[in-house]
Amino acid sequence: MPYLQPLNIKTWAEEDRPREKLLLKGKAALSDAELIAILIGSGTTKLTAVDVGKIILSAVGNDLNELARLSVKDLTKHPGIGEAKAISIVSALELGRRRKEATVAAKTRITCSTDIYNYIKPQLLDLPHEEFWVILLNRANVVMKKESISMGGVAGTVADPKIIFKKALEQLASSIILVHNHPSGNTKPSAADISLTKKMKEAGTFLDLPILDHIIFTDNDYYSFADEGIL
């Protein structure tokens, strides 16, 4: 039986090879699978790198946001993907996420719940676990700082009001916005979310550090306590 060599993209017509195609036609001309093929470099004895890219994308419904959720361990379950190739894919997607974050202006003024959602999106998009963040504002509602308070599992995370107000007082903030994500995609607040918001609102009134909003973040939507008239 003849020895099977990995299928080589170099045997294709030049205009169909991902790297050459990028040089000839530009990056926008490449499919998602072709871009993944460039990242991983090679396929298997039976699959080209582009084939492997198509398999990976098919497993997440061709949704790049879902692909960004996958861990190195998740990716290595696919044929032709070892740890090094998986790391390349994860790293490329993380660079894309950081690019989104870098586009946010250094001085962001919050005027509505949509501003909050867009501002915190780079931190919470694609996360498979819950995180709790606070956004600290000055008197003009300009962001002074955003702080990670806690990180939890799929089902929840814990936010300590003492830590939140300590951070706000240290920064001499004038107001606070609470944000946490629901990886499930469900924007409905839990009883714990409502209880925490009420507790934070009462403490903020006493300390003259009002809670302007509490946002429940999901990748495609959000829930605003302020918009719903709960704050």
Image (tube, rainbow, N blue to C red):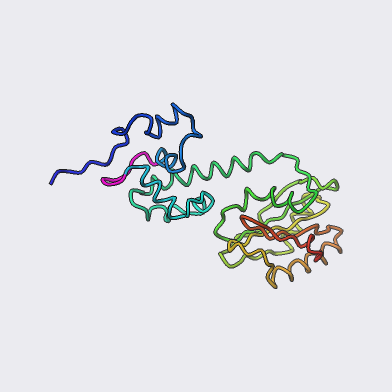
Q: Is residue 59 left or right of residue 206?
A: left
Q: Eyeballing the image, is 105 above or below 138? A: above
Quadrant housing residue 225: bottom right
Looking at the magenta stretch, what is its main secondary structure? loop
Q: Eyeballing the image, is 4 above or below 127? A: above
- The number of numbered badges drawn on the structure is 0
Magenta stretch bounds: 40-47
State the residue lying farthest toward the bottom: 191
Q: Is residue 136 left or right of residue 14?
A: right
Task: State the quadrant of the C terminus.
Answer: bottom right
* Residue 89 point in image, percent of width and height: 45, 45
* Residue 191 point in image, percent of width and height: 70, 73
Q: Is residue 170 left or right of residue 220?
A: right
- 111 and 132: which is toward the camera: 111
What residue is at 73 percent from the left and 51 percent from the top? 116
State the residue lying farthest toward the left: 1
What residue is at 68 percent from the left and 70 percent from the top? 190
- 169 and 10: which is toward the camera: 10
What residue is at 76 percent from the left and 56 percent from the top? 177
Quick check: is 178 in the magenta stretch? no
* Residue 146 point in image, percent of width and height: 70, 50
- 174 and 28: which is toward the camera: 28
* Residue 205 point in image, percent of width and height: 86, 63
Quadrant housing residue 209: bottom right
Q: Is residue 154 left or right of residue 207?
A: left
